[in-house]
């Protein structure tokens, strides 16, 4: 066999090796990664998704979604003042809508998540049947435990609305108290309803607690022990009975109260309230007796309104009066008498400066519901400078 011929020598380039000859062949994974980098770096190729819409169109969609939330039934101050045992599922629509919007994308989540948690409540029963007191208790406990575990969400809470029941009251109230302590931006607590059977549990739970961040409280008279745990509160609103026990709590523990609402201005209570709130500047009173199961009981007469002139710094007086015929009850007086007495009370205070009288005209809605016979609804408001 003839010998193999030697390979001819090739000339060596003085320019150095070519990069494509020295580099190994790219793997399929590397090719895919390179393609992704190119796509991500090229804004023109990333043209899908909600955020790639024109700014004007996105703003229009955003405003429509937000308007749908604002139009939903919500747990408003007026709803809490009705002192129902609980609210039905229609009051959960807004929260459900906000939760859905917060799960669409990161941008909507950044906007709607704080709105979702701005007002949390455990006073709505979503389903019919079953023991409502158990449903409300379990809801409050679950909500409190969840906020305790997520401080990043807890910072969003501004308003907390609850219905407190007798179901496992001691343990649930203790968990709720722990939760309230870690809510740095909470300023309002609304207790829509509280069982009279839990007075002792409220006292044991809150007698050694302090919530200095709370400024506004709506609560029934039987929940006065919770009020004692809020030394910095400036606004106290009663949604059940005459508020006499709340006045006692204010006198002992709440020295900064400037606004009160629906505490009956009868002479005995008014005398104690005058000593407890020397800096009172605004008084709101429902003259229709709507904080009771009987809408015509304990109505505020015009003569009682005149006693409010004893508050030296009173600048704003708001009265809610009925638009119904006074013949429907001997306790209902004409609107002119209430307005006249309220003006006299404001005029006789020692405050030098502008004073304002707000008159809310309301009617009694007798629409039957499962857990309440009806309620007063404000239909018109007038303002008078005194």
Image: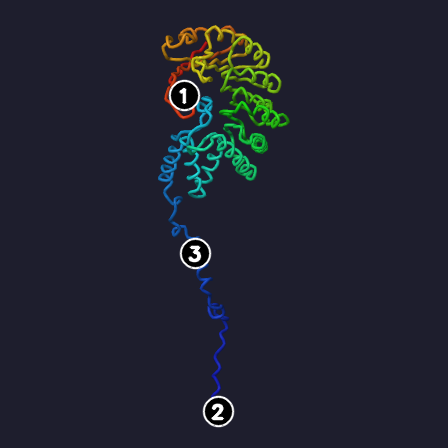
Q: Nearer the viewer, residue 354 or 232?
A: 232
Tell me residue 61's x, y (percent).
36, 38
Residue at mark 2:
3
Q: State whether residue 73 is above or below residue 15.
A: above
What's the residue at 43%, 6% (across, down)? 340
Q: Residue furthest front?
A: 130
The part of the image, by quadrant, that contains residue 57 is top left
> What is the C-alpha distance between the residues marked 1 and 2?
115 Å
Judged from this view, the residue extending furthest toward the bottom is: 1
The spot of residue 99 in percent (x, y) is: 44, 38
Horizontal placement of 284 versus 367: left or right?
right
Q: Secondary structure at mark 1?
A: loop
Specify whether 326 is left or right of 239.
Answer: left
* Element carrying mark 2: loop
Which residue lies at the image location 43% right of the left edge and 36% below the top edge?
A: 98
Report the front residue among 367 and 313. Answer: 367
Residue depicted at 59% across the width and 12% down the height: 275
Nearer to us in this view, 195 or 146: 195
**Residue topped by disc 1:** 373
Colour logic: rainbow
Which residue bears the numbered disc 3?
38
Answer with the quarter of the image where residue 82 lies: top left
Q: Which mark is residue 18?
A: none
User: Which is more N-terminal, label 1 or label 3?
Assistant: 3
């Amino acid at each position: 066999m003839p010998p193999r011929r030697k390979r001819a020598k090739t000339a060596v380039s003085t320019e150095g090796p070519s990069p494509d000859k020295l580099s190994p062949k790219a793997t399929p994974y590397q090719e895919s990664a390179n393609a992704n980098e190119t796509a991500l770096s090229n804004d023109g190729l990333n043209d899908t998704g909600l955020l790639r819409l024109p700014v004007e169109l996105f703003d229009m969609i955003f405003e429509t979604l937000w308007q749908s939330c604002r139009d939903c039934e919500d747990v408003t101050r007026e709803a809490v003042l009705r002192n129902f045992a609980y609210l039905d599922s229609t009051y959960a629509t807004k929260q459900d809508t906000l939760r859905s919007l917060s799960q669409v994308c990161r941008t909507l989540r950044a906007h709607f998540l704080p709105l979702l948690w701005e007002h949390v409540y455990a006073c709505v029963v979503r389903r019919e049947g079953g023991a409502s007191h158990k449903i409300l208790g379990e809801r409050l406990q679950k909500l409190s435990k969840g906020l305790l575990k997520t401080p990043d969400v807890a910072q969003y809470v501004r308003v907390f609305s609850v219905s407190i029941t007798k179901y496992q009251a001691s343990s649930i109230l203790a968990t709720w108290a722990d939760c309230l302590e870690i809510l740095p931006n909470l300023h309002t607590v609304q207790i829509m309803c509280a069982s009279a059977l839990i007075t002792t549990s409220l006292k044991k739970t809150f007698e050694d607690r302090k919530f200095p961040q709370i400024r506004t409280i709506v609560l029934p008279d039987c929940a006065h022990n919770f009020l004692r745990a809020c030394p910095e509160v400036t606004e106290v609103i009663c949604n059940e009975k005459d508020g006499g026990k709340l006045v006692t709590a204010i006198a002992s523990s709440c020295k900064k109260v400037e606004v009160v609402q629906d505490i009956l201005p009868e002479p005995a209570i008014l005398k104690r309230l005058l000593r407890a709130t020397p800096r009172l500047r605004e008084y709101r009173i429902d003259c229709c007796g709507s904080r009771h199961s009987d809408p015509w009981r304990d109505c505020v007469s015009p003569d009682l309104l005149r006693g409010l002139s004893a508050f030296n710094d009173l600048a704003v007086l708001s009265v809610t009066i009925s638009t119904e015929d006074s013949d429907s009850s001997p306790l209902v007086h004409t609107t002119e008498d209430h307005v006249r007495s309220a003006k006299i009370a404001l005029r006789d205070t020692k405050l030098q400066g502008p004073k304002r009288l707000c008159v809310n005209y309301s009617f009694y809605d007798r629409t039957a519901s499962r857990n309440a016979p009806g309620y007063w609804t404000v239909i018109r408001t007038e303002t008078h400078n005194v």
